[in-house]
């Protein structure tokens, strides 16, 4: 009975650790929950093959990466990785596959260890929490003595499935994995109808309210932009826009009035000139008679 109770306590502690790792509060009105991305032991690990940095002068070698979110690498561990120290606690591994028929010439490194105390979670952008979330593991050490870092960048995107797209080594022994999905978006931007912000808006940071929220398209409202508004577009004018329209109308009326005044003045000038010419002609005739 005591053994069963001990097992239950360990299981509860592990679940609590996963939940702690999977949740994050930015203290900026934006909270995150990536605990659903954790894969249990029977599920395959996340996998991505990449390494060549775009637009660089050289062609970098591609590697295969296996990793998990807030936990150890799940699924079957490749045979070339079984001899690694602490492989049972590895959260991310890097494999260099030589492409030969045998795996004896392949090599493997632990590039990230799962340790609740050392897992780092932070925002991708300290000024805008809607850009996404970063999860960092520390791994073993390179020959240069630098500790390996495995950085998972969960970019906020309107994608339900979190699938790694890139794995690049921007600096030596530091590996950056890109995973765009709704899990990189704050919970304050809900998913509705299988779309971020219901597909009727976009997730952004409201600096006036100091919180993340859905900015709805015209005609929609609500926290998830799921409610249609009854306001007609023709009457949906802001006070500033209405003031601008009135000002332009007054300016146009003033221009029209000025133009009419100039036309009247010109007509009067032409009439005075014609009368002057007539009077001048009469004076010349009288002079000739004398």
Image: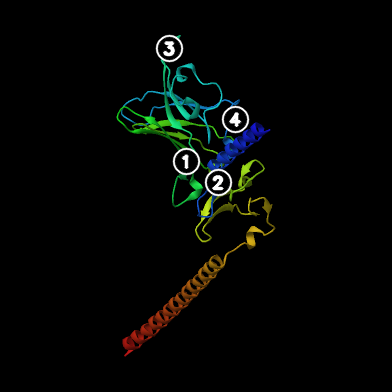
Q: Where is residue 169 in the image (x, y as percent from the top left)?
A: 38, 31
Considering depth in this image, is 64 or 222 the residue closer to the camera? 64
What's the distance in space between the residues labelled 1 and 2, CA to CA? 19 Å
Label 4 vs 3, first from the N-terminus: 4
Which residue position is annotated with label 4? 40
Residue tagged by mark 3? Answer: 104
Judged by depth in the image, the label closer to the viewer, 3 or 1, is 1
Indicate the quadrant containing the C terminus: top left, top right, bottom left or bottom right: bottom left
Question: Which residue is located at x 67 percent, y 50 percent?
Answer: 226
Distance, label 3 to label 2, CA atoms, is: 42 Å
Q: On the rendered image, what quadrant is the N terminus found in?
A: top right
Q: Quadrant of residue 111?
A: top left
Give the number of the mark in front: 4 or 1: 1
Report how far apart the C-alphas of labels 2 and 4 lie in the structure: 20 Å
Q: Which residue is drawn at 65% across and 40% down?
A: 194
Q: Earlier in the sequence, mark 1 or mark 2?
A: 2
Mark 1 or 2: the one toward you? 1
Whether pointer 3 and pointer 2 mark residues with C-beta atoms closer than 8 Å, the reply is no
Q: Of helix, strand and loop, which one carries label 4?
A: loop
Q: Give the vertical position of 78 relative to 55 (above or below).
A: above
Per the image, the residue denoted by label 2 is: 32
Do we see residue 158 in this rendering? no
Q: Mark 1 points at which residue?
A: 117
Precedes in sequence: disc 3 or disc 2: 2
- State the CA–CA distance, disc 4 to disc 1: 20 Å
């Amino acid at each position: 009975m005591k053994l069963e109770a001990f097992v239950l306590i360990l299981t509860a502690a592990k679940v609590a650790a996963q939940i702690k790792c999977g949740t994050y509060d930015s203290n900026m009105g934006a909270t995150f929950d990536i605990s659903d991305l954790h894969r249990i032991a029977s599920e395959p690990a996340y996998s991505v093959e990449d390494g060549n940095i775009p637009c660089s002068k050289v062609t970098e070698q591609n590697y295969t990466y296996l990793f998990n979110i807030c936990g150890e690498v799940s699924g079957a561990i490749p045979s070339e990785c079984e001899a690694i120290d602490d492989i049972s606690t590895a959260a991310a591994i890097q494999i260099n596959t030589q492409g030969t028929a045998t795996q004896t010439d392949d090599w493997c490194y632990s590039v990230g260890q799962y340790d609740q105390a050392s897992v780092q979670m932070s925002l991708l952008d300290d000024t805008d929490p809607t850009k996404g979330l970063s999860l960092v593991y520390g791994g073993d050490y390179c020959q240069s003595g630098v500790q390996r870092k495995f950085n998972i960048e969960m970019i906020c995107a309107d994608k339900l499935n979190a699938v790694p797209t890139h794995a690049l080594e921007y600096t030596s022994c530091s590996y950056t994995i890109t995973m765009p999905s709704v899990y990189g978006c704050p919970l304050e931007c809900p998913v509705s109808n299988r779309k971020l912000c219901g597909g009727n808006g976009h997730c952004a940071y409201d600096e006036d309210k100091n919180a993340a929220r859905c900015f709805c398209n015209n005609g929609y409202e609500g926290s998830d932009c799921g409610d249609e508004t009854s306001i007609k577009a023709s009457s949906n004018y802001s006070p500033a826009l209405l003031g601008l329209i009135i000002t332009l109308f007054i300016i146009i009326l003033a221009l029209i009035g000025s133009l009419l005044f100039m036309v009247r003045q010109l007509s009067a000038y032409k009439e005075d000139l014609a009368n002057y010419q007539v009077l001048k002609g009469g004076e010349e005739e009288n002079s000739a008679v004398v």
